[in-house]
Amino acid sequence: MSGGLNLGGDTLTRNAFIPGYKSPEFRPTPCVKIARERNSSCMAKVAFIGLGVMGYPMARHLAQRGKHDVTVYNRTGAKAEKWVADHGGKSAPTPQAAAEGADFVFTCVGNDNDLRQVTIGPDGAFAGMKAGAIYIDNTTASANVARELYDAAKTKGFASLDAPVSGGQAGAENGQLTVMVGGDADTFETAKPIIDSFAKMVGLMGPAGSGQLTKMVNQLCIAGLVQGVAEGIHFAKRAGLDVEKVIGVISKGAAQSWQMENRYKTMAAGKFDFGFAVDWMRKDLAITLEEARRNGAKLPVAALIDQFYAEVQAMGGNRWDTSSLIARLEHNQP
Ligand code: NAP
């Protein structure tokens, strides 16, 4: 079969975002149902709001890999114009206008307040969304705002998923993000083939808010580990060891981690321009520590690392990447 996919008599244009279409487990996804209803290729009408470091390439994958019809909105209009010039599609003057008529509406903005502004604020996306559509939020935000938006969406007759991502700028550029989703199972099944456009792993973690709670676990598992790698490299230097040799050996043993393998060179060299910013990590730790105050989890290391990051900020490191924890260990040292 060249370029066509036969599903029970209908032939649809083959699209990369139909996952597993070659495998025996393949079954028509709800997205394929959309295509069937339209008697056309498997394409959805998608809005993407927030073309930052992450959103810009994520929207590109929806257009190029997913072959969806994408309308973008960005607060700073020039970025949206550039996106359209680079990738086609359309830009809209407000989140509401972007969302009008869309089957799927994505957001990827900064924090809870930004998210409220672009969804339920004036000219927000929720005012434009049609009944039966699906709203998907890729911002790292609180579980509370995820539940709030889930309820607001339900009242208006559409569905909502919180779907924060992990994998950083490189993961967004390569379309290899991990996506942690909270919401209803049937909504997830419908949205997953669309999210697959920019992801290597998409998991439903539980009801609304569970995606954000899972992202908090992700950040907890990273924060202490980065401090451990920082202390290890710092100690190796003070002990007069060859850092390159040390990591070359211990990264083959139980101390191995992604942070060690990917960040040790730049950490040892004091270079911190490689992704996720300290300001963002402090935002994530703040919502995590707040959630822990509610659920009773004990997070002594996370609380301490949060203060270490505050010191990095005081050193001017707001936009340094998170491996800059080593900088405060080496601050004012001979
Ligand atoms: P970013 O580059 O700073 O982009 C933020 C985007 O949100 C921009 O498009 C910005 O518009 C828009 N925005 C912010 N506040 C807004 C508001 N009040 N109204 C309308 N638009 C607003 O951030 P990012 O790195 O893409 O991160 C986005 C989210 O993903 C954050 O929650 C972050 O924690 C999370 N995340 C980031 C990474 C990473 O490695 N960067 C990894 C995983 C998760 P303007 O262009 O007008 O400023």
Image: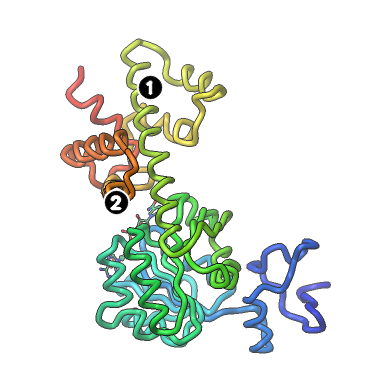
> Which of labels 1 and 2 is toward the front?
2
The image position of residue 98, as x and y in percent, is 39, 81
Give the x, y percent position of residue 66.
Answer: 59, 70
Q: Is residue 238 left or right of residue 19?
A: left
Question: Which element carries disc 2, helix, strand or loop?
Answer: helix
Q: Residue at 26% of width from left, 34% of height from top?
A: 304
Task: Return the residue at label 2.
Answer: 294
Q: Nearer the viewer, residue 59 or 22?
A: 22
Q: Is residue 101 above or below residue 319?
A: below
Identified by mark 2, the residue type is Arg
Residue, far top: 240
For the point 76% across and 74% down, which residue is it? 3
- Circle 1 sits on which residue? 232
Q: Position of residue 7 (x, y in %)?
A: 78, 78
Colour pattern of the rendering: rainbow
Q: Which mark is residue 245?
A: none
Label pair 1/2, CB-CB below 8 angstroms: no
